[in-house]
Image (spheres, grey):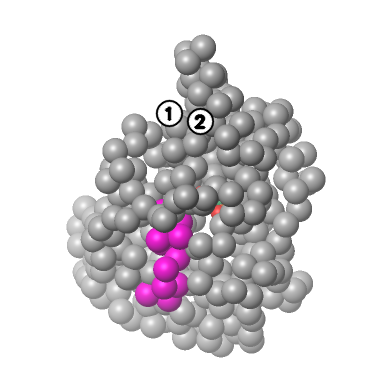
């Protein structure tokens, strides 16, 4: 496994690879502090492609909360070990802000996607995500790029950016990997206390409760309120939102109709740690 830190070297290396061989390149962008969720994306890429690139970069532009950025977990050695084991061919880990040199950002019409749900509570977050993924796509120019369903709205934003910027890259969505307790794996879980880690399992338990009970004809508002109230009962936890949306348009769904596919997206504070999760339901 190669590890590269320079933007120019990585670009040249991958350009040569693309020109000299007919290799299919798969790409997995990450912010490091890797867990089995990230590794599932890497393994999918290794299976689908001839060469897999993983980037590790804690992108300052996508943090709307400075203390979240300052406290974001980093474990470079362990990340490299996990990636090597998973079959990754090249790790690209740009240093500092070199990747944004002479780059103002990619301006696009978000069609309002950056103002709802995550966007409402994390102003500027999606522009930061678009900026880094746009730059990484320019440098790596993969055939396929892999993203987790856990960040469902991010996936929608990246699909839109890929189309707007005319990148010839297939965006692949991968399922959420969970702890045994059901808690969605996240780098931020490392910052939870033992008690918080246990309490946080209630997020997926409540999503499963909704999955079992919600049926055609039901109003979603009462389920949303139920989720928020149940989270509120747990010490140190507070729900920021619980929304029911169309999986394609992300429009809010108020009443469940026949033959519909919806996604329930939630954001919950566990002490000072903000966690997100979701579940897709088909009726
Ligand atoms: P991050 O390092 O948090 O920016 O995540 C990098 C990629 O891994 C994103 O596409 C995430 O959606 C994905 N990811 C994060 N957590 C999980 C998980 N529990 N299961 C599957 N994919 C995940």
- Is 136 in front, or is 174? 136
For the view shown, which residue lies furthest in the front direction? 102
Q: Say few, some or many: other residues with alpha carbon within 10 Å of mark 2 (under 14 / 14 to 19 / 20 or more).
A: many
Residue located beneath label 1 in the image: 143
The residue that appears at 42% across and 68% down in the rendered structure is 124
Q: Position of residue 27 (x, y in %)?
A: 52, 35
Q: Position of residue 253 (x, y in %)?
A: 25, 68
Quarter of the image with the C terminus is bottom left
Q: Which mark is residue 26?
A: 2
The residue that appears at 51% across and 51% down in the rendered structure is 100
Q: Is residue 133 magenta?
A: no
The answer to whether one can see residue 40 in this image is no
Q: Is residue 126 magenta?
A: yes
- Is 155 in front, or is 139? 139
SS assignment at label 1 = loop
The secondary structure that most of the magenta stretch takes on is helix
The residue that appears at 58% across and 39% down in the rendered structure is 7
Magenta-highlighted residues: 120-130
Mark closer to the chain start, 1 or 2: 2
Q: Is residue 191 above or below residue 78?
A: below
Query: To which quarter of the image does residue 238 belong?
Result: bottom right
Q: Position of residue 16 (x, y in %)?
A: 54, 19
Apparent side of residue 228 relative to residue 80 in the rendered image (left or right): left
Give the alpha-carbon distance from disc 1 to disc 2, as whole Å: 6 Å
For the view shown, which residue lies furthest in the right direction? 77
């Amino acid at each position: 496994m190669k590890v590269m830190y320079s933007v120019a070297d990585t670009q040249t290396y991958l350009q040569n690879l693309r020109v000299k061989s007919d290799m299919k390149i798969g790409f997995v962008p990450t912010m490091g502090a890797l867990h089995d969720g990230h590794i599932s994306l890497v393994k999918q890429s290794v299976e689908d492609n001839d060469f897999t690139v993983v980037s590790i970069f804690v992108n300052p532009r996508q943090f709307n909360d400075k203390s979240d950025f300052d406290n974001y977990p980093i474990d470079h050695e362990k990340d490299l070990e996990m990636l090597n084991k998973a079959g990754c061919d090249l790790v690209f880990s740009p240093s500092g802000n070199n990747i944004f040199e002479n780059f103002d950002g990619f301006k696009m019409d978000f069609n309002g996607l950056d103002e709802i749900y995550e966007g409402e509570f994390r102003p500027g977050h999606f522009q930061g995500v678009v900026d880094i993924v746009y730059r990484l796509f320019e440098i790596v120019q993969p055939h396929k790029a892999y993203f987790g369903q856990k960040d469902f709205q991010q996936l929608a934003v990246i699909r839109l950016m890929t189309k707007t910027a005319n990148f010839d890259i297939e965006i692949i969505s991968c399922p959420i990997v969970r702890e045994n307790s059901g808690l969605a794996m996240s780098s931020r879980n490392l910052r939870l206390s033992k008690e918080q880690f246990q309490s946080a399992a209630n997020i997926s338990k409540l999503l499963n409760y909704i999955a079992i009970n919600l049926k055609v004809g039901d109003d979603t508002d009462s389920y949303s309120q139920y989720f928020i109230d149940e989270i509120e009962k747990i010490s140190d936890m507070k729900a920021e939102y619980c929304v029911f949306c169309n999986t394609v348009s992300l429009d809010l769904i108020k009443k469940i109709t026949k033959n519909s596919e919806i996604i329930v997206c939630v954001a919950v504070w566990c002490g000072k740690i903000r966690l997100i999760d979701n579940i897709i339901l088909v009726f």
